[in-house]
Structure formats: structure tokens, C-alpha cells
Amino acid sequence: MLIRIDTREQLPLDFDRCAVVRNTIQTFDYAIEGDQFRFAIERKSLPDLIQSLAIQKNWCRELKKIRRARALQNMPRIFYVVEANREDIEHFDYSLFTGGRVGPDFIFHQLSEFEYFHDVHVIFSGDVLGATRDIYRLLKRRFEDLRQQEDE
């Protein structure tokens, strides 16, 4: 299995068990080389996730990215892997958002919209090591599925 990491990924994860190649992925950050048009994974830090859910233009951009992945690339499953725990949303510093409407309740509401209406699987991995582990496992499962399809 060869993991493709998008060239726009600023601090790519280190997959010590697997070879990687840096190349463009049309949508999202991590994929299996040769399968990047059908299955890819988005990686988010907690601040990035919260800004994606809380700021209207970022929310619209994420939804557009998901729609594009489904429409143009026919991606049946979409995964967001977050380098934090779900509970970290409660303790995030929301003071940078003015207006007072953005807080844990709003973020949890947006997450439920994301997961329920847009069928996005959001995995909270705890930290960078957990994200590396979870992305690797998802890609490995996809790779096994592709091999099984070839054998049929």
C-alpha cells in the first residue's frame, strides 16, 4: 500500500509502516495512491475543525468540498479525522469569535449537522499519533477492500 499525501498538507503525518508519495489530491488530504479519486480522508486540528464549523464562509467551503467529492469523484464515504478528543470542544478558547454565538453547543450542533445531514464520519483521534493510527487503519481497510474486489 502506497499512501498519497496532498501537497497542500503543511505538516504531513509520518507513516512509519508504509511508503508515502507527495502529490495532489483533488479533495481532502490522504488517500491510497491510485484510489485518490474514489476515497480520501480529511485531517483537521481542533482549531481548524472549529473554524470550519463556526465561520460561515468556511462552513460553506467544507460543504462544497463534500458535495464535489460526492458528485465529481463519487466518494461513497467521507471521513474527517480530528487531532483532538470530542471533550476538547468544551475547553476550546472561543474568545476569538465575536458576537457570542460560537461556543461548545453551537459546535456540537454543527457537528451533528455535518454527520447527520451530510453523512460525514468524524473521528476524534486524540492527538497527532492517534490521527496517524486512525488514518492508516482507514486506508488499510480501504486497500483490503479494493484487493478483495479485484479477486472477485
Image (cartoon, helix red, strand yellow):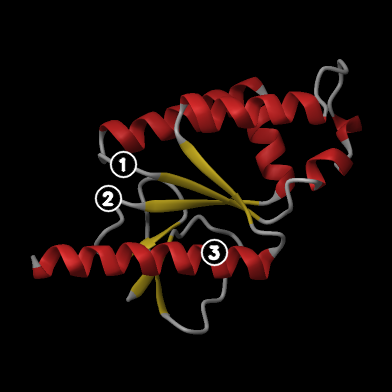
Q: Position of residue 150 (x, y in %)?
A: 12, 67
**Residue type, label 1:** Pro
Quadrant containing the C terminus is: bottom left
At x 65% / y 58%, what residue is drawn?
125
Does residue 31 appear to the left or right of 112 in the view shown? Answer: left
Give how far apart the Cα atoms at labels 3 and 2 are.
Answer: 20 Å
Of marks 2 and 1, which one's residue comes earlier in the chain? 2
Instruction: Name the element at disc 2.
Output: loop
Does residue 120 appear to the left or right of 11 in the view shown? Answer: left
At x 71% / y 59%, what residue is drawn?
126
**Residue type, label 3:** Asp
Q: Which mark is residue 134?
A: 3
Give how far apart the Cα atoms at labels 2 and 1 are.
Answer: 11 Å
Residue annotated with mark 1? 76
Please state which of residues 148 and 76 is positioned toward the viewer in this rendering: 148
**Residue type, label 2:** Phe
